[in-house]
Amino acid sequence: MLKKLAIQLICLLGLVSTFVSAQGNQPTSWKFQKDQDNKCVAQNLANPGLELMAQKLTITTKETSDLKSYVVSVNDQTVVPMSRVNLTDTACKCIRIRNMGALAANDLKIRIQGQTTSDKPVELALNVKDMAAALEALKSDTCKKS
């Protein structure tokens, strides 16, 4: 009985190590897939409203759906807008961050401060892990491997 259990445990460990090595350097906090335009994108598993592409991060949450204006800071640095309050993209009711230099750190604290169309203040804080690793995986086009 103990011998059978040991054999099963060894087989399970072998499968796990094979799976881990197949994953490579792909961060586990992001899900990589192709979008409707057949481009590789990464969706954050902890915050499904975050979608990362090689040139931008898109934030779509219930808080961003009614924003009239907003300011975004990443790790206490204002990234959107640089000089004035920005307006929400009404096509997707989302916020797009295109300052990829500000997104280069692995752990990000994104803070959104804004105002709704009914002039109510909105404050949203998001913690994002493995951002730099996800950007590297997108550059290597990890979607071709899946």
Image: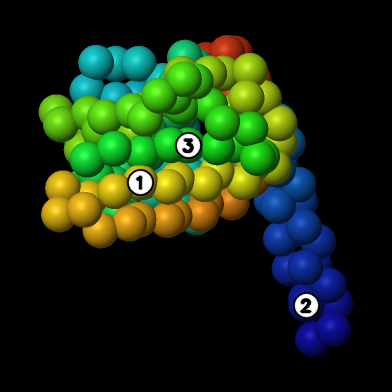
Alpha carbon distance from label 1 to label 3: 9 Å
Q: Residue at x 43, y 37 (%)?
A: 71
Amino acid at circle 3 = Val
When the figure is inspected, residue 51 is found, relative to residue 128, above or below; the finding is above
Give the labeled residue for mark 3.
Answer: 72
For label 3, the SS is strand
Disc 2: which residue = 5
115 or 16, which is in the foreground? 115
Q: Residue 101: where, in percent of width, then height? A: 63, 18
The structure residue drawn at horizontal position 42% and vertical position 47%, both measured from the top left corner, is 113
Name the residue located 35 percent from the left edge and 46 percent from the top edge: 114
Q: Which mark is residue 114?
A: 1
Which one is in front, 58 or 67? 67
Seen from this angle, which residue lies furthest bottom? 1
The first of marks 1 and 3 along the sequence is: 3
The image shows residue 91, relative to residue 48, as above or below, that is: above
Secondary structure at numbered mark 1: strand
Relative horizontal placement of residue 8, taking residue 90 as reference (left or right) = right
Position of 116 with respect to 121 (left or right) is left
Question: Is the residue marked by circle 3 packed among few (<14), some (14-19), or many (20+) residues within 10 Å?
Answer: many
User: Which of labels 3 and 2 is toward the front?
Assistant: 3
